[in-house]
Image (cartoon, rainbow, N blue to C red):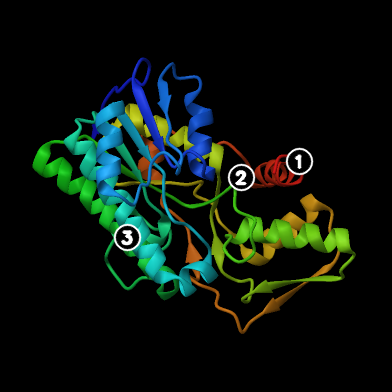
Amino acid sequence: MTETAFELAGRRVWVAGHRGMVGSAIVRRLAGEGCEILTAGRAALDLLRQTEVEGWMAETRPQAVFLAAAKVGGILANDTRPAEFIYENLAIETNIIHAAWRTGVEKLLFLGSSCIYPKLAAQPMAEDALMTGPLEPTNQCYALAKIAGIKMCQAYRRQYGCDFISAMPTNLYGPGDNFDLQSSHVVPALIRKVHDAKVQGHAGVEIWGTGNPRREFLFVDDLADGLVYLMKHYSDDQHVNVGTGEDITIRDLAALIAEVVGFEGEFVFDTGKPDGTPRKLLDVGLMNGLGWQAKTRLRDGLRLTCDWYLTDR
């Protein structure tokens, strides 16, 4: 493992996916780095089109790239629209990674997902658990696309000497999250359900599954800080887990959100719906060993997220 000093100050830095939750957090974090932040909206650049991506990058010449653009969603979205998830994610990452090599990008950070690990991987999940067992069926198409992105970065690094690295965040939440109940992840879905139930005076809130699965949650601004840290200080073939190293049951998460929102009703668990992976906790020893740790407590992050949902949408 090699630690390097890659300064962002004075460089042109492209945040691909700047309008998403992660991308917007990276833009916020980069504001103090003294770099020129490059962005491109969908009207200006279709990331699914290789020629457009190569043309735009050849014109703007980014020196560093945060590849945060992706097709994302919760269990329902992944399970019912697998073709969209595998095609769009493969297209986005292959287009950008290949164009980064062709246009001489100095450094690229690819953003993966903890769902790349086997469904029944030993907990906490270390980086070397990758490809050691079957994936969770409900989101395997998304996971396969993300695994391909990791392998692309490693391949371009090995064959062409590109300084391309990968980071694997745990479950994320925070300002800019998706609160659409048809496609959202668990934290924003619960915040919306609990808030709506409080406002409408409902006695209970229904939750998919048993409530027993354990999940780790990282505040998105902490992730952005960790990604900038990796961009500046890490250069190696190995992808790096980024998380808190702590997990919580969905049942306890719901209770914590209810406390933050001020909802005093009950939760009804629909055990006929899938739980997904029983537990997802990352081994963050490598990241912590590099000198970085998450700072935001879950309760504080949930309160900030609720505040954003209620006031800044």
The residue drawn where x is 42% and y is 62% is 123
Residue closest to the far right:
201
Residue indicated by mark 1: 311
Query: Would you call the spot at circle 1 few (<14 residues within 10 Å), some (14-19), or many (20 or more)?
Result: few
Estimate the x, y position of residue 119 in percent, counting from the top left: 40, 70
Task: Estimate the spatial distance between the alpha carbons at disc 1 and disc 2, rounded to whole Å.
Answer: 13 Å
Residue indicated by mark 2: 174
- Locate the N terminus and report the quarter of the image it occupies: top left
Residue kind at label 1, given as amino acid type: Thr
Task: Estimate the spatial distance between the alpha carbons at disc 1 and disc 3, rounded to whole Å.
Answer: 35 Å
Among numbered discs 1 and 2, the one appearing first in the sequence = 2
* Apparent side of residue 54 relative to residue 196 in the rendered image (left or right): left
Residue kind at label 2, given as amino acid type: Gly
Q: Up-down: is 105 above or below 47?
A: above
* Tag 3 secondary structure: helix
Residue indicated by mark 3: 145
Query: Would you call the spot at circle 2 few (<14 residues within 10 Å), some (14-19), or many (20 or more)?
Result: many
Residue 4 appears in the picture as rendered = yes
* Marks 1 and 3 in Cβ contact (< 8 Å): no
Residue 121 appears in the picture as rendered = no
Among numbered discs 2 and 3, the one appearing first in the sequence = 3
- Locate the C terminus and report the quarter of the image it occupies: top right
Estimate the x, y position of residue 265 in percent, counting from the top left: 85, 66
* Tag 1 secondary structure: helix
Residue kind at label 3, given as amino acid type: Ala
Q: Nearer the viewer, mark 2 or mark 3?
A: 3
